[in-house]
Amino acid sequence: MSQSEHPAARPSFFKRILQAQESGLILVILLMGLLLTARGGTKPGEMQRIPLPEAATVADVDGVLVISSPTDEPLRAVRAALGDGGKGLSNIRITSGGQSVSAVSASNPRVLDGPPRALLVSGSESKFLNSQNLVLLATQASFIAVMAVGMTAVIILGGIDLSVGSIYGLAAVIGAFSLRALQIRFLGPGADVLNASAGGAPWLVAIPVGIGVCCLVGALCGVFSGSLIVGLRVHPFIITLGMMAILSGLVFVLTGGQSVSGFPESFTKGFMKMPAGKVYPVPMLIMGLMMLAGMFVLSQTVLGRRIFAIGGNETAATYAGIPVGRVKITVYTISGMLAGLSAAMYLGYYGAAAPGAGQGYELDVIAAAVIGGASLSGGRGSAFGAVLGALLVQMISNGMLVLEIDQSYTQIVKGAAIVVAVVLDQAKARLAPVGR
Amino acid sequence: MKSLESAASPSDPSSVLLAAEGISKRFGITQALDDVSVTFLAGEIHALMGENGAGKSTLGKVIGGLHRQDTGTVRIAAGPGQMRELTPGSIDDAFHAGVRIVHQELAQCPNLTVAENLSLHDLPRTRMGLLDRRAMTERAAALVHRLEPGIDVEAPLGLLSPGRRQICQIAAALDDRSASGGSSPRVIVFDEPTSSLSIAETERLLEITRKLAAGGITIIYVSHRMGEIFAVCDRVTVLRDGKFVATSRVRDLDEPTLVEQMIGRRLSTPTGKLPSLAAEGGHVAHPGKPLLKVSGLSSASKLSDISLEVREREIVGIGGLVGSGRSELLNAIFGLDVHARGRVDADGKVISGGGPRAAIEAGIGYVPEDRRLQGLFFLLGVGENTVVPYMKRLARALGIRNQAGESRLIRDRFAEFRVKAASPASLPGELSGGNQQKLLIARWMGEGTKVLLLDEPTRGIDVGTKAEIYKLVRAAADAGAAVLLVSSEMPELLALSDRILVMANGKVTGELRDGEMTQANILKLATAEREMPAGQEAKDAGRVLPAR
């Protein structure tokens, strides 16, 4: 009814959803998840130990484990572990108190003798859709996502930063040297930094040093390329391409091609890889935090709106008195700093800096930003989209593993995803009202 | 032209060259054209008029094949007594039938030379298959020099003035390709051809237009400018809100009637015969303190030693030809020209060397010449477009936006300047040209604005909005602002200015006051040559500023 009256003032619910910035991306992620769940197959889940009452009898009848129990406990426990019923051949048959009978299938059920007697079962779970895989996916995506938030700002500005991967590498290496030096300082000279199980730098020192050094290195690299871009009026593509080569060369000079490790545990297991239950949530939390920070800065601060203004029309921005050069340097600095932060996450999570760290990340990061809706001609993009884009990029790598496709195809699929994302984005723009 | 008219009376269907029948075209929610039918006769100059958003440009583009109409047909004469339908939305078919369009925003490659631009469709080759530069240059020269002998066809197009670029486009449209199996031009659609031209260039263009029509080419002339319509056109079709209003012979019309047709009501101040909006004699006699002082402003080859003063409540017009350095002067005053040397004071503060920020902080507002390129952010909402220069001033600590303050400012300015937008989040592209311009003026005319620099503030906008803008500018001056106005539209310049400075070759060649402010005097000073002995002729026209 309202549709016929004001077709433009209030587009239909479906159309609004369709036009919302990130809805398409979420849809694609869901569809891909669905596909990976359906096509990815299953694997044995985690082993579960179900205690059997003393009075229960166990027998193996033609490969079927027959358990007779006087109580309902084992039956309930098995059902809870494997779900009701079972697909395929049942290989466990449980009789409880002579009343209810249940047949379930489990992979490789065994009975552990010896007090107390227990049944070992593991259900099957989707290779893709299981908590472990999803957490791993999100964690790996978080390294890319943090950088993609910065890259989105750069791309909205109408620029590009090809050096983020190398900044990440350099920040990781210098951060690693600093953390090791810190550890040596606290353990005393001559101590075995690599195998110190206790002691070392406390978190109050280790965390600020780890994050601080990495971010500082990243920020300095950003200031440098930003200043060159503004001062020399050279296209950012050229400057950051040069920086990419220079910085990754520097990494090899500094490390001599060797990995650097020996960090305070308070930074690794005590922070970045701090377990909470069975997961290590800190990188994911940082990703969420940076996404929120990015969304806030881009929409709620003067800097954010100036970034959009410059990307949309740099000449008009100059005429409106926006300090274009300063904003540009700031944005490249932020992008560099976020690459540094990502490097700090990597150091703490993996506990070492490899000399090749971050190589090729620029592709993933730019892909994430662009898939997330950032327009390479400037003026459009979102931090939320960037994080979704990073998840999608990581999902491609992960999906390759799940589907047992040769890893060599990953780059091909990623490349195709960028192209498809941009084409879809343009198709969506055509649905929008004229005059844009 | 007259002979053609007598040979082809409008009622004689055999002389119809082009007929648009029942054309409708919708963009999103806007019905740009609603069942419009117009016939164009062979060899006539036929104006399409209407306010912005009336659909005249859209009709021109449908005829030229740039837009595909939703319904209706465009037919063109093909052989005696026969018409053939043009394929809707096909530039190729329209071109092949001899329909050419000269459009301001039409793609040209500024990095290529004039000659290359003119030959892009068919680059001449030598027998070896290499690019035949000489043939290309000759062809370009033949086309361009017919219209404007001074143009260097081997110069990159981007280095030419907008006026000359326009002439190159016309030259391209005139290219007769019948010899190479193509078509010769039969219909040329001019879409706002003079909006970026200076007075002299406009005169030249009108002359060319007449010549073309006399040669049998039908000209469809889309324009806002009343004076041009009466100067060259045979018939005029008026559109309003996408609907056909009337087609009339120009000689049967007078201006008030035409304006009435365009806006649907009679306007108290029709353009062309603008009543003076200059301040009352009292203001000129006792203008306030000087708010803008420019002394010895020079910049490379663009400006040389310019000194001027604009006082409180005063509107100073700057006349001159395109390329005389008028926009460059405003840029330099606003701090956009890093090479500028000299001193600029705004309200007693030195702002030269501080860039646009210093200028804005001193209370200078600048509405630049090209609102699409230099003014608007098309990806930001109209609200943000208005508030961009003040966001920082309004912001809270750490640069966090004060959105309540922003909304208040947007609401106030939109109300004051009557910007018609659905909401502050609407994009500027959804606004009409007049509203876009009002948006930019609203951006720069706040309570804090002491000096207003206006560069062609009414270019390409409709008469109704023009009158509105004139009143706003005058009101701003009366409220105490100093206004520096650049305009190529003589009536506008003469009506608004309290005095007029005329520029040529980057210099101020003279100042005109009161009775000296006439079109002839401005033109005389604008064409003053540097070698002119001691400004002898300029002196006749008006006071010459104390020589450098």
Image (tube, rainbow, N blue to C red):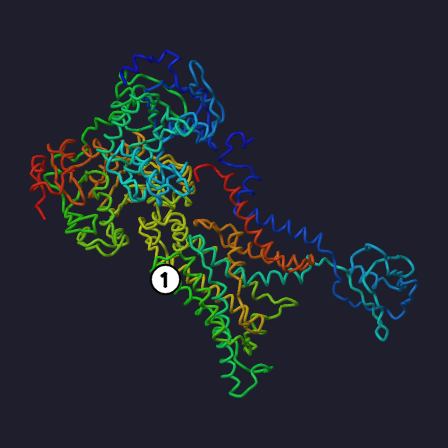
Residue at the location (54% across, 78% down)?
A264
Q: Residue A94, located in which quarter of the rendered image?
A: bottom right
Residue B489 is situated, as x and y percent measured from the top left of the image, at 23, 33
Report the side of A372 relative to A32 (left or right). Answer: left
Above or below, B378 relative to B256 = below
Secondary element under disc 1, as helix, strand or loop, is helix
Q: Badge 1 is on which residue?
A: A228
Q: Chain of mark 1?
A: A
User: Residue drawn at (60%, 55%), measured in percent from left and top?
Assistant: A412
Query: In this view of the protein, which residue sits in the foreground, B347 or B165?
Result: B165
Residue B426, x across and y down, in percent? 42, 40
Report the front residue among B310 and B26: B26
Q: Could you tell me residue A159's position as x and y percent?
A: 42, 55
Which residue is at the far front? B127
Q: Is residue B264 left or right of residue A10?
A: left
Give the answer, above or below, for where A294 lies relative to A216: above
